[in-house]
């Protein structure tokens, strides 16, 4: 869900930066109207516009739901993170795993900026749909992420949890 901060908002624009080399990307929009999807390979960045179908009044809400499918070639990812520029009342970060590549260990984390170390909030386990999620309430501005370890990639690039944080 998103809330219009001004009169006349007609779209939600999101920017995804992915660490591994992306070969292809596509987006599937379930709530909203697919707008422009731009893939910037040199920056490993995807920009997705989801249109509301009409102009919103200030403070009016709209539901958006999209899934980004990424072909990262032969690279193995070990985390997914999103940056929010402003505090949010609610936020959902959801990662699906292929049933043949389930992680051994997952952690939800937060960091204030790209220059700061991650502080791990809690250990997570995939559910029956082979996914994990993080849904912080009153989400502060900063970087929210999920990291994982697999048999093929036993040590994530993100900092390990501190003592006693599992």
Image (spheres, helix red, strand yellow):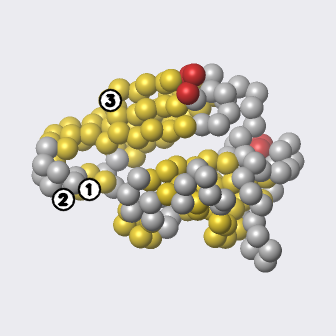
Please tell me which residue lies in front, 18 or 60. 18
Look at the numbered discs 2 and 1 and tell me whether their residues touch, using CB distance below 8 Å: yes
Q: Which residue does the image show at 55% across and 27% down from the upper left?
A: 43
Which residue is rendered at x = 72% and y = 53% of the image? 158
The residue that label 2 is drawn on is 59
| Nearer to the camera, 158 or 103 | 158
Q: Quadrant of the N terminus?
A: bottom left
Residue 52 visible in the current orientation: yes
Q: Which mark is residue 35?
A: 3
SS under mark 1: strand
Chain-order first, disc 2 or disc 1? 1
The residue depicted at 35 percent of the width and 39 percent of the height is: 13
x and y percentages locating residue 105 in the rendered image: 77, 59
- Please tell me whether mark 3 sits on a helix, a strand or a loop: strand
Q: Is residue 24 above or below residue 59?
A: above
**Residue in view at x 49 percent, y 31 percent:** 46
Distance from Cα at disc 3 to Cα at disc 2: 22 Å
Q: Earlier along the polypeptide chain: callout 3 or callout 1?
A: 1
Q: Position of residue 86 (x, y in %)?
A: 38, 57
Alpha-carbon neighbours of circle 1 within 10 Å: few (<14), some, or many (≥20)? some
Task: Give the mark, 3 or 2, whose residue is nearer the N terminus.
Answer: 3
Residue 8: x percent and y percent? 14, 44
Residue topped by disc 1:
3
99 vs 111, nearest the viewer: 111
């Amino acid at each position: 869900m998103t809330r219009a901060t001004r009169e006349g908002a007609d779209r939600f624009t999101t920017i995804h930066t992915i660490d591994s080399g992306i070969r292809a990307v596509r987006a599937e929009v379930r709530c909203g109207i697919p707008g422009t999807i731009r893939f910037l390979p040199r920056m490993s960045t995807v920009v997705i516009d989801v249109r509301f179908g009409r102009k919103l009044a200030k403070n009016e809400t709209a539901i958006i739901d999209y899934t980004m499918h990424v072909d990262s070639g032969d690279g193995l990812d070990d985390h997914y993170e999103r940056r929010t520029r402003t505090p949010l009342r609610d936020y959902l970060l959801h990662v699906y795993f292929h049933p043949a590549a389930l992680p051994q260990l997952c952690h939800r984390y937060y960091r204030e900026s790209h220059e700061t170390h991650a502080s791990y909030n809690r250990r997570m386990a995939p559910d029956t749909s082979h996914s994990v999620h993080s849904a912080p309430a009153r989400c502060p501005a900063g970087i929210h992420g999920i990291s994982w370890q697999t048999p093929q990639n036993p040590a994530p690039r993100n900092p390990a949890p501190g003592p006693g944080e599992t």
